[in-house]
Image (spheres, rainbow, N blue to C red):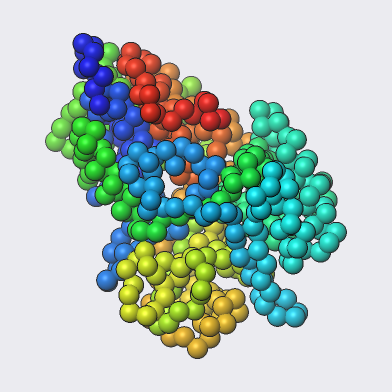
Amino acid sequence: MPDGTSQPTRRAVIVGGGLAGTTTALALADAGVQVTLLEGRPRLGGLAFSFRRGDLTIDNGQHVYLRCCTAYRWFLDRIDAAALAPLQRRLDVPVVDADRPEGRRLGRIRRDALPVPLHLGRSLATYPHLSLAERAAVGRAALALKGLDLADPTLDRQDFGRWLAEHGQSARAVEALWDLVGVATLNAVAGDASLALAAMVFKTGLLSDPGAADIGWAHVPLGELHDRLARKALDSAGVRTEVRSRVTSVSTLANGRWSVQVPGESIEADAVVLAVPQDEAHALLPEGALERPERLLALGTAPILNVHVVYDRTVLDAPFFAALGSPVQWVFDRTAASGLKDGGQYLALSQSAAQDDIDRPVADLRARYLPELERLLPLTRGAGVRDFFVTRERTATFAPAPGTGPLRPGARTEAPGLYLAGAWTATGWPATMESAVRSGITAADAALRALGRPRPAHLFDVEEAA
C-alpha cells in the first residue's frame, strides 16, 4: 500500500517465511517498501504448518492462542483469517484425572463474568483435583505472582518451581494447575522455567483481564491460515514471495546497501531482516553484526512431540481436554479440520517439554500412549485404531530456562539495515505465535524508521499493547 509520496523506492529482503517473517513483510509492504520474502521450505508458516497424509490434512502440531495474544489476533485479521480460528466465548478447560483411587475424575478450569481475580474464584473453589488447603494456597500464590514487577531483571535468574515451593505450592498443585498451564505455554516444567517468563504468562493470561485466557484455535488446517491466506495477503500487498529459496549469505556492499545471495541470484536491498531460527541467524550474521553472536547458540531449544491417533468411531465429545496423572498432556479433536468424514475420529495429543519421548520409536510411543487414552477416555476401549503416527519438532522453541533473558537479542543489530525477528528474540513473551508476530512488527518498525518510511496506521502497536 504505497503512501503516495515522492519518496524514493526502498527495498527490503525478509529471510524466512514463518509468522515473524510474514508479519515483517506485510508491515513493510503496507508502508510502501518493495519487499522480497525468501523461504527455504516449499511453504510458508514456519513450525505451524500442515501436510497431507492419505486423504487427511494434518497439522504438524496443535497450536492455540489466547485472547490476550493481541498481536497474533491482529495478524489473523490482516490475512482475513480471524473467522477460521475463533476464540471461546469464555475460558473452559475440561481436566481429566484417571489416576485416582475412586476412578476417573473430571474437573474444569473456567471463568465467570467477574473482574480479576474473582473471575476464577468459583472455578478454583470447586476444582476437584486439589484439596481445600491446596486451593487456598494457590490463591495466595496467585496474588503474590500478580504483585511481581516484570521489569525486575532478577526474576529471570530465578526458576519458577523454586518460587512456587517458597510460596506454599505442593507437588500436586504444581502438576494440577501451574504446570497444566505453564508446560503448554512455556514448553518447560516449572523447575526448568525462568520466573520472569512464567510470571509474564500467568499475569498476562490469568491475572490481567477476565477474558485474557479464553482459548482460540484454528478450525481449519494451519496451512490454510499461515500459508494459503498469508500468501494471498502478501501477493495483494505486492510482496515478491519465493519458496524453495534458501539464502546462502548476507553481506554489505560498497554503497552501504545489502546483498542477499540465493542459488542463481543476488538480491540488493536497503534493509534485510533475518526471520529464521537462532542457529540459522547465527550462520548468516556478518562479522560484527552482534556484539556477542555466540549467545544465539547458547539459547537452548526444547522439543514438542505430537501423537496422532485415528479411531474408527467417536471417542471424545469435547473439542479438547487436559490430563493429569498421565504422560498425556492435552488432547484435541482434529476430525473436522483434517477432513475425516466417515464416522471415525482423529485425536491429536500435544506433548510439550517432551525430552523423554522425542526420540522414542513409534512402536514404543504407541505402546505408551494408547493405554493412557483408554484410561482417560473409556470409549476408546472398544474402538479400533485406524492410524497411529507422530510428528516431532526437536527444536520447537527456545528453552525458557533461568538466565535466558540476556541471550535474546532485540530487533536491531550493530550493522545498519540488518534486523532480527523470531519468537526467540527479546519480545518478553515465551516462544509462541504471539511472540513471533510481535517480533516481526518490532523489526518492521525499526526498519521503517531507518528507511524514513511512515508507519502504517493499521499496524499493531507493540509498545502500546505492552
Q: Quadrant of residue 311?
A: bottom left
Q: Position of residue 146 (x, y in %)?
A: 72, 39
**Image-based side of 140 in relation to 449, left or right:** right
Query: What residue appears at the point 32 percent right and 16 percent down from the top-left corner?
Result: 453
- Return the x and y of residue 82 as percentages of the image width and height: 39, 47
Residue drawn 60% across the image and 79% down it: 375
Name the outermost residue toward the left.
264
Quarter residue 270 falls in? top left
Q: Quadrant of the C terminus?
A: top right
Relative image position of residue 55 (x, y in whole percent):
27, 71
Q: Judge whether 31 appears above or below 41 on screen.
A: above
From this view, report whether residue 376 is shown above or below residue 401.
Answer: below
Q: Is residue 194 visible?
A: no
Residue depicted at x 81% and y 64%: 131
- Front residue of 39 and 439: 439
Query: Which corner quadrant holds the N terminus?
Result: top left
Please say if 317 is above or below 407: below
Residue, far front: 113
Q: Is residue 456 left or right of residue 393?
A: left
Mark yes or no: residue 166 visible.
Answer: yes
Image check: 29 left or right of 212? left
